[in-house]
Amino acid sequence: MAFGISNNVKSRVVRECTPELFHRVTASRLVGDTCAEIADAWERYKRGEMAKEDFETLKADRKKRLPIFTPHATFKNGRRLNADAIPSGLSMYDIDHLPDPRGYYAERIEPKANELGIVLAHVTPSTEGLRLFFVIPAGMSLAEAQKWMSERLGDPAYDQSVKDYARSSFAVPKDYILYIDEEKLFAKELPSEELEGVKGVKADTPERSDNSFNSSNSLKKDLSFKGIPYRDIIARWFLLAGGEPVRGERNDKLHRLASHLRYITDNDEETLLRVMPRYGLSEEEMKGLIHSACSAKWYSMPKMLQQVLNETDSRVTNRELPDTGSSMTPPEMPRKLPALIALLVSRTPDIYKPAVAHAVFPPLATHLHKVRFRYIDNVEHEATLMNVLMAGTGAGKDCVSEPINRIMADIRRRDEENLRREREWKQEVNSKGANKDKRQRPEGLVIQEIDADMTNPAFVMRTAEADGHFLYTKLNEIDQFDALRGSGRGTQQFQIMCLAFDPGNRYGQTRVGAQSVTEKVTIRFNWNAATTIQKGKRYFSRVLTDGPISRINFCTIPEREIGAEMPVYGTYDAAFDEELRPYIENLTRAAGLVECPEAYRLARKLKEENAEFARLSQSRVYENLSFRANVIAYLKACVLYVASGYKWDKTMEEFVRWSLRYDMWCKMEFFGADIEEANGSVQSPKRGPRNLLELLPDEFTLQDAIRARQAEGKDAEGTRNMLWQWIHRGYALQLTTDNYKKLKYRKDGNDIDKNSQA
């Protein structure tokens, strides 16, 4: 009888709610302060001091901050989707627009709370309603339970939208709670005398009344589409269609469902008759309805069905490459790390280690001076590395600060001496009159770490004086870059990001004034920045296809579970600094063109793996972003190689491959769909690309391939070319004009036969 809890309505992660979590949330300051703010606004509205629209806006905004419960279910994959629901046996019931919710409860509900099966009752965050959690009577569906409660309470105008498993309930402070039966609310199993038929509700294929789409006997058998049970597809379809049929719309809604499902059942009436829910219709009525749907003109797969398949297909994973991450989480960090990375994350809590492992490269590379690495296209690159950490508010983005501070300590000591010389010169110049001879600006003012809010002329001057050294800065927020954008609504900050990555770039300014900066420079600029996911997406939204995103290395911090223990850092002490010192010295001593055969071979291997994934996923965006992501990964490999005293080991290859996959996961997760849309391509699903070949059966037709492309938001016109590539690359064999057979796929870099080729 478990139910779920999540950080807020936007959170993707749901976990089982325990009594400890429940009470921690209801006693939290966040919940108390947020609900108090809503209550205060409600009082101001009632006094005429606040417009209704303003109150509704404030209420909606503040409720987004609140943790939520999912009383109807927990979820198999931790995602709040009906398709993944494990029903709890509970239902929630709302009574809105009450002038006195507490009085209503005391008078109308409390006397019969036990017979109604109520386990929790509380005032809603708006303070003008009641919410009840109650045990579903035996054999009833959610909709039936809602109707049953409305009849018992004499409430014909009840909220009928509270009947899908993913429905959430906002947390409230403990003083809003009017009644709680903890024993039943958190019971693992319901007493049989109270809920004899509901034990089956906890199973993956719940037994419910004949009005439920899960009641069809055929759905208990192994019938599925590409590994997705039809019951999951139908459940998600009903959710998008506005809910299960109610009186008066049964025939129309079931006909529409059949009209959609025929696209994934080969228009087969017998299959549809087995998988379709009936909602009381007879066998003959169902046959007539399905025949009518299958007789209609054939069009392309309905967009709504495409969305259903995209959102329910969580069972098929991409197996042709090393871990590319699921649609929910990035690839898992290798357990065995290169010695330098292991040291730099050794004082970091586990949840932050992937972010730190990416963020340390810009400051590490800043120690290299005029060191070059030849990439696989024969172009020489310096270690130009830029990192943006995108994570939620309060996620712990400052986790990267102390490792960066330790890496930059020696550069900051050198900078301080030159900053002192610069201050003394400025004081001397300012102390002399306008007509006095003034000493020229001192030479050798190499100051590598610049202020986050430095203007464009100052940036050019610092670059010119750096004598080929990298400049570096750490920005607490990405929009601090706007200081470099030039006058008005310029975009020079994005130009600088792009040029900083490109070998042999030229940048500068020409000014007439004698005191103005007139320089042409090669930008060498490594940096770290942090931002929330929403702000980061908004910041780069105008330059999605202009180059910055592909040149930057992205990382993130996963959302912590509600009630998780506070991460505890280790101590950064003299022993840590001493262990880090040899790596920094190796970087500082390096010079000239450095050859690392192992990194070079790895770059070629990763380039081909990226190309293979692009061919199999048919994602042009993935392919385009992977080109520079591979360069970034190569440069990281070279930095590790130099820092380790020109020594290579197997952990470096594993780490660099993971780093590339992680970077690509972040780019596709945060920007992939928006870039697709900006390019004018067919709208892609809001998640990373997948191997289309794995979505097909071992033997498949041209129509199967078309449907697989369309289910992933791709056009049908590219199907023939895709199949030609697969045949040319040995992924598939053509049997007849429109029939094909899979030959192999790649897993962890090894080819595995799918079928014999006899």
Image: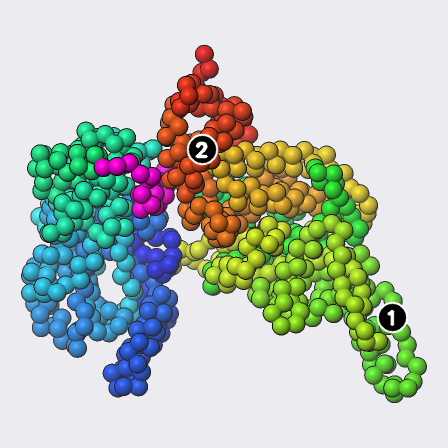
Left or right, 71 with reference to 451: left
Identify the residue at image location x=61%, y=42%.
627
Residue 300 covered by magenta stretch: yes
Q: Find residue 485 and report its horizontal and vertical position in percent.
A: 64, 67
Q: Amino acid at mark 1?
A: Pro
Q: In the displayed image of the protein, which residue is found farthest to the front?
A: 297
Q: Quadrant of residue 232?
A: top left
**Label 1: element kind:** loop
Q: Label 1 neighbourhood size at 10 Å, few (<14), some (14-19), many (20+)?
A: few
**Label 2: element kind:** helix
Q: Find residue 350 and report its horizontal and vertical position in percent.
A: 51, 51
Q: How far is disc 1 from disc 2 in space, using C-alphas?
A: 65 Å
Residue stretch rendered in magenta on the structure? 296-316
Residue 350 appears in the rendering? no
Residue 237 appears in the rendering? yes
The residue at which mark 2 appears reads as 719
Identify the residue at image location x=13%, y=54%.
145
Q: Find residue 751 and report its horizontal and vertical position in percent.
A: 52, 24
Q: Earlier in the sequence, mark 1 or mark 2?
A: 1
Q: Amino acid at mark 2?
A: Thr
| Frontmost residue, 196 versus 170 | 170
The residue at which mark 1 appears reads as 442
Instruction: Single out the mark in the foreground, 1 or 2.
Output: 2
Coloration of the structure image = rainbow
Compared to residue 97, the image places residue 581 above or below, namely: above
Q: Find residue 347 and report its horizontal and vertical position in percent.
A: 58, 54
Q: Quadrant of the C terminus?
A: top left
Left or right, 268 with reference to 8: left
Q: In the displayed image of the protein, which residue is found farthest to the right?
A: 437
Identify the residue at image location x=31%, y=36%.
228
Q: Label 2 neighbourhood size at 10 Å, few (<14), some (14-19), many (20+)?
A: many
